Image (cartoon, grey):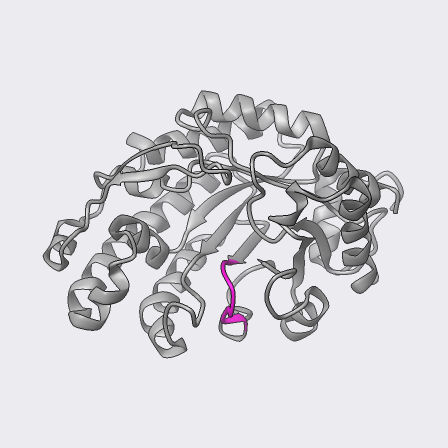
């Protein structure tokens, strides 16, 4: 057990086995350095080499899955590092008919797949690389600036047809990125919250399309499902075909320990993804230790509840890593 490699540490944690120290990884966006496979590869390796994480969550721009359908965006200084969509492909309900399958071997999807391959190759496969894959309904939200929620209640059949096309592309994206070298996927849904829709609505327009994407990730050795937002539908998603779960555990129920007990899955979290930008190093380290202690070092990965602000001091990131490595 002593002196485990990053991959061994992750695999043992997912299996609920003893580890030398628990795995740790933190992530943020890299605006203006995420538009090509080569640039994203370089900044990802810089981040990894600086902190030596146990796995890498690849951080393509959050709108990448919309670009090949005609969306346009620019970075306007958001502290989260996200880009602002300036052109939405969907503005009216009839626009959903334009959403047809697009190839994943060209355009922005190709760049994101290639980035995962390049990072994995440069690290000789020694550090697990997770590709970011958005749920079909999340992509529909991004394509329409959130109007899909109104549209699915007005003309559900139109939205279902578009979601089927989005799911086809997302499945192809998942398969291709795993074939090209990604170790697993970070599957993110930003809609599984009662702040946006009912559980029944999510089952119909969310889970019904999430399942086929996760099924396409059969080759994934580490599928990490991210449930975004407050008032999340944890009980609905805890049964998903995944190895681990991640949510804003410092900001919304359940707690990390409650989530692990309820799901029986490994949980990733413990770090308040927003507050870390203003914490002391002592406070950042304390959150890491608390996460570990709350699970007795079993089935737990220290990670942020979501993406960290780009102005997060590197000293705070290092404090988290050091606290974890200290055991």
Res 167 seen here: no
Measuring from the top left, give residue 56's x and y in whole percent.
Answer: 61, 38
Residue beneath the point at 83% across and 62% down: 296
Q: Does residue 262 appear left or right of residue 242 in this picture?
A: right
Q: Locate residue 262 relative to residue 297 in the image: left or right.
A: left
Looking at the image, is 86 positioned above or below residue 50?
A: below
Name which residue lies at 45% across and 68% down: 193
Relative depth, front residue between 288 and 189: 288
Report the magenta residues as a range: 227-234
* Whether residue 3 is visible: yes
Left or right of residue 292: residue 145: left
Q: Based on the displayed image, in which of its 4 quarters is residue 128 positioned?
A: top right
- Residue at image position (42%, 34%) is 113
Q: Is residue 196 above or below residue 21?
A: below
- Residue farthest to the left, as pictured: 94
| Residue found at x 34% / y 56% | 136
Which one is nearer the viewer's eye here, 273 or 98? 273
In the figure, 239 relative to 65: above or below? below
Give yes or no for residue 230 being in the magenta stretch: yes
What percent of the width, then of the height, locates residue 94? Answer: 10, 57
Q: Is residue 53 magenta?
A: no
- Number of marks in the image? 0
The majority secondary structure of the magenta stretch comes to: loop
Residue 44: image location, x then y, percent: 57, 28
């Amino acid at each position: 057990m002593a002196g485990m490699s990053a991959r061994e540490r992750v695999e043992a944690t997912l299996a609920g086995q003893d580890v030398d120290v628990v795995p740790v990884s933190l992530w943020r966006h890299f605006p203006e350095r995420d538009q090509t496979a080569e640039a994203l590869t370089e900044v990802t390796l810089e981040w990894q080499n600086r902190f030596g994480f146990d796995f890498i969550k690849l951080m393509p721009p959050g709108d990448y899955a919309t670009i090949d359908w005609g969306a346009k965006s620019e970075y306007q200084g958001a502290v989260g590092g996200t880009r602002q969509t300036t052109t939405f492909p969907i503005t009216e309900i009839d626009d959903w008919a334009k959403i047809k399958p697009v190839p994943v071997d060209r355009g922005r999807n190709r760049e994101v797949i290639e980035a995962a391959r390049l990072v994995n190759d440069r690290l000789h496969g020694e550090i697990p690389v997770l590709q970011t894959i958005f749920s079909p309904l999340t992509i529909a939200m991004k394509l329409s600036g959130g109007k899909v929620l109104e549209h699915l209640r007005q003309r559900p059949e139109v939205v279902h047809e578009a979601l089927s096309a989005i799911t086809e592309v997302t499945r192809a994206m998942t398969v291709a990125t795993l074939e090209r070298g990604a170790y697993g996927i970070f599957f993110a849904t930003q809609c599984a919250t009662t702040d946006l829709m009912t559980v029944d609505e999510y089952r119909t327009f969310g889970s019904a399309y999430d399942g086929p994407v996760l099924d396409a990730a059969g080759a994934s050795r580490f599928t990490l499902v991210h449930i975004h937002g407050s008032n999340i539908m944890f009980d609905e998603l805890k049964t998903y075909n995944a190895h681990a779960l991640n949510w804003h555990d410092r900001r919304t129920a359940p707690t990390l320990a409650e989530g692990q007990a309820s799901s029986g899955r490994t949980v990733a979290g413990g770090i308040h993804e927003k507050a870390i930008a203003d914490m002391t190093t002592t406070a950042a380290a304390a959150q890491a230790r608390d996460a570990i202690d709350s699970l007795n070092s079993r089935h737990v990965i220290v990670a942020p509840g979501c993406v960290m602000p780009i102005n997060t001091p590197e000293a705070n990131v290092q404090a988290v890593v050091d606290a974890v490595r200290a055991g």
